[in-house]
Amino acid sequence: MTDPGVTPPGGMSERSDRRGIRLAVTLEWTTLLWNVVGVVVLAVLAWSASSVALAGFGLDSLIEIGASAVVLWELRGTGEVRRRRALRLIGLAFVLLAGYLAVQSIVALVTVHRPAPSLGGIIWTAVTAAVMFALAAGKSAVGRRIGNEVVVTEGRVTLIDGILAASVLAGLLLDAVLGWWWTDAFVGVVIVFYAVREAVHIFRES
């Protein structure tokens, strides 16, 4: 079913269509490369700070990498069957993410695990939130411009990624300023619900 906000391809020139596709590809590559760097950065920060939320956000970055790859394949005309298979793999990744975070968050709460303050984590998640919100807005606009529902949908995934970054940032700040150690694990639980919801949605759509 076509998104009511997506402009039909027939309503634009072929040149405009090509430009829009190139812009969409650029946005997806930017998202993918940012998250590749983010996985490495967050792995180091999560390890040094013993942060469940940062570890979970790093895993979420892996999911976003997969989502961007799916869109890049779709824009190259790889076919509906392959796209659906890739979406199912992303859905499975969300399930694994939810399972990992559920266990880690419960253990952290039960053992009263206190993560170390992480200035690097605060800076990275703040910048990432701003970048993801900007990319999400760009994908939404260009996706509607070229009439591509996949780009619009993946833009919503990027938007959620930005919201998660903002949530993790809030947890880190509350822990650093007020000493609310439990907010780190609490954010992990929030991501669990998000991951399960997204997995269900993806499996239904695919």
Image (cartoon, rainbow, N blue to C red):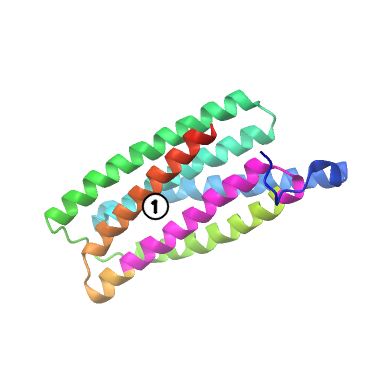
Which SS class for mark 1?
helix
Q: Magenta: predominant secondary structure element?
A: helix
Q: Which residue is mark 1?
A: 41
Asked whether residue 45 is in view, the answer is no
Q: Position of residue 138 (x, y in %)?
A: 65, 56
Residue 107 is inside the magenta segment:
no
Q: Which residues are magenta?
A: 144-172
Q: Position of residue 68 (x, y in %)?
A: 56, 41
Figure quadrant of residue 82 = top right
**Residue 146 painted magenta:** yes
Between 135 and 37, the one nearer to me in the picture:
135
| Residue type at the position of mark 1 | Val
Q: Is residue 129 visible?
A: yes
Q: Give the residue drawn at x 68%, y 36%.
A: 75
Of residue 180 and residue 23, the one placed in the foreground of this image is 180
Packing grade of label 1 (10 A; few <14, some 14-19, many >=20) is some
164 left or right of 4 in image: left
